[in-house]
Amino acid sequence: MNPIGLAHLTLLRLSPPELVSTAAEAGFDFVGVRVNAVTAGEHQYPMEPGSPMSRETLRRLDDSGLIVRDVEFLTLRPETGPADWRPALDAGAGLGASTISVVGSDPDRERLADTLAALTADAAPLGILPTLEPISYQPVSTVAEAAAIAGSTGAAVLLDALHIQRGGSSIDDVRALDADLVPCLQVCDGPLAAPEHLDLPEELPLGMKADGSVLQAEARVQRELVGHGELPLPELLAAVPAGTPLSVEVPHAALQTRLTPLEFARRNLAGVRALLTETRTHV
């Protein structure tokens, strides 16, 4: 069976303790927690070890039986170093996380690999593995590029259904990966082709920004629930190792204005369970 988790971006307006309680009530197996602000102006939850919010998150994890599988998010820029990633690693270790997601925004491949190798070395004593996510609008945009860099540094690859499609990677690219490079698959849905325009809400959670390209806006606030789009999800699921954990990353700002967080979480979980049933039927 594939464990199913709820990525924080799906319900970013919820604090980490609220996310845990909502995920547990909806029936998820794990959560991913944002411990590091990503976009300019984004409010950061105070998740340093020992903080009131971190302690409350741990209490709710203990009460529910859920785990924090991953924490996010680090952008590896030319100037990124230990001072940038140490707080996130410490917060993740305090929550018992096993992975931390990163994106490579440094166009210098050699320098990026050196930075990721240093991060991987610092994360290892804490039991945390960095996962490099190929993102369609970043310098590292394809599965093959991410695998080459991660494989040379001891890191892994974070696969995301939307970015695989938008970045021009294929199911064969996913199938070619070594199993130990794929600790998790982020799932969502959407149209096969990127939209030309998106109407965005005026206010986004935490002061998050979705300006820039349509690809950025779609990824951050306008993904579709699993089963409500055209992405080749059954084929993608069949291409990753059996039992790979699935993390639901479906920020859908418009739909969230009409549903409670629990209703939205339950709809997402139902979509993934239906996908798993469909995939097993055709295997």
Image (cartoon, rainbow, N blue to C red):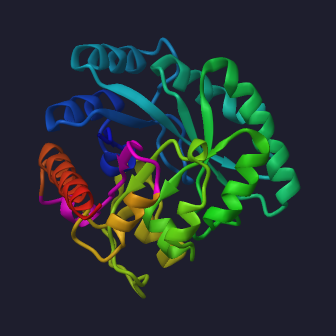
Residue 9 percent location from the top left of the image: 39, 49
Residue 149 percent location from the top left of the image: 75, 53
Q: Splitting the image into 4 quarters, where does residue 93 fall?
A: top right
Q: Nearer the viewer, residue 229 or 242?
A: 242
As for residue 242 lying within the magenta part, the answer is: yes
The image quadrant where one finds the N terminus is top left
User: In the displayed structure, would residue 175 be above or below residue 196?
Assistant: above
Q: Splitting the image into 4 quarters, where does residue 245 fall?
A: top left
As for residue 26 lying within the magenta part, the answer is: no
Q: Splitting the image into 4 quarters, where does residue 153 fall?
A: top right
Question: Magenta residues?
Answer: 240-258
User: In the displayed structure, would residue 1 be above or below residue 94?
Assistant: below
The image quadrant where one finds the C terminus is bottom left
Q: Nearer the viewer, residue 138 or 51?
A: 138
Residue under the image location 35 percent in, 46 percent down? 12
Residue under the image location 46 percent in, 21 percent down? 95
Q: Is residue 126 visible?
A: yes
User: In the displayed structure, would residue 186 be above or below residue 197?
Assistant: above
